[in-house]
Image: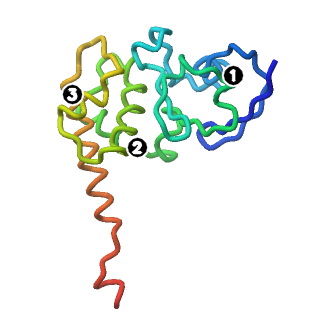
């Protein structure tokens, strides 16, 4: 057993784990973070995507001991309590959910994409989601949802900029 300490969705956890325990298994089986889905178990589908220190990773290809000392965000920790993240809201409103199996991984990957490129073209969205597969072939609505989320997040960022005239008053 190996001692690990990591922060998941804002909560600090310390545990003893088998050195070969995958991060996806730790999240689901030990912490109950079942929103992180095990899809192919070979890192091909992206259903298990989480953020590890702000970068999207396929948690079926990361050992829990590799995440020691890190910050992990799952789909459960993405939005604020009682409030969906703009990407989650856009997926809901644009009917990008299909069967829902790929959705958590798609949303986690999309949030990283939008952090790196706040105004992606549809081609850039498709390229950014390349490692995440939708078996329902619902990519059109997923691309539309990510584009819609980009617009929402950009509008919110503009709204958060203080008004220079208001600052002088």
Image location of residue 25, percent across then percent down:
62, 17
For mark 2, give the secondary structure: loop
Which is more N-terminal, label 3 or label 2? 2
Q: Residue at x 62, y 44 (%)?
A: 10
Image location of residue 148, percent across then percent down:
23, 42
Q: If the image is split into quadrants, where does the N terminus sit?
A: top right
Image location of residue 151, percent across then percent down:
23, 49
Q: How many marks?
A: 3
Q: Residue at label 2?
A: 85
Against 101, is 162 above or below? below
For mark 3, give the secondary structure: helix
Q: Residue at label 1?
A: 30
Of residues 117 and 49, the one nearer the viewer is 117
Disc 1 packing (10 Å; few <14; some 14–19; many ≥20): few
> Label 2, label 3: how many angstroms apart (C-alpha)?
17 Å
Asked whether the residues under the numbered discs 2 and 1 touch, taking CB atoms below 8 Å apart as contact, a structural biologist would say no
Q: Residue at label 3?
A: 141
Against 75, is 37 above or below? above
> Label 2, label 1: how many angstroms apart (C-alpha)?
25 Å
The circle on residue 52 is none
Asked whether the residues under the numbered discs 3 and 1 touch, taking CB atoms below 8 Å apart as contact, a structural biologist would say no
Residue 33's quadrant in the figure?
top right
Q: Residue at x 54, y 36 (%)?
A: 73
User: Position of 47 compared to 94: left or right?
Assistant: right
Q: Residue furthest bottom?
A: 169
User: Position of 16 compared to 33: left or right?
Assistant: right
Against 108, is 83 above or below? below
Which is more N-terminal, label 1 or label 3? 1
Residue 160's quadrant in the figure?
bottom left
């Amino acid at each position: 057993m190996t001692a690990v300490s990591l922060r998941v969705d804002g909560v600090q956890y310390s545990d003893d784990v088998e050195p070969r325990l995958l991060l996806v298994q730790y999240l689901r089986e030990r912490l109950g973070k079942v929103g992180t889905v095990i899809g192919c178990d070979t890192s091909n589908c992206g259903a298990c995507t989480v953020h590890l220190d702000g970068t999207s990773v396929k948690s079926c290809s990361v050992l829990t001991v590799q995440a020691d000392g890190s910050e992990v965000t799952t789909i459960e920790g993405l939005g604020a309590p009682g409030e969906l993240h703009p990407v989650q809201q856009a997926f809901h409103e644009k009917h990008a959910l299909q069967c829902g199996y790929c959705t958590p991984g798609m949303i986690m990957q999309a949030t990283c994409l939008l952090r790196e490129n706040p105004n992606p073209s549809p081609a850039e969205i498709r390229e950014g989601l390349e490692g995440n597969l939708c078996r329902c072939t619902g990519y059109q609505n997923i691309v539309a949802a990510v584009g819609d989320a980009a617009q929402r997040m950009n509008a919110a960022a503009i709204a958060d900029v203080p008004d220079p005239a208001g600052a002088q008053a």
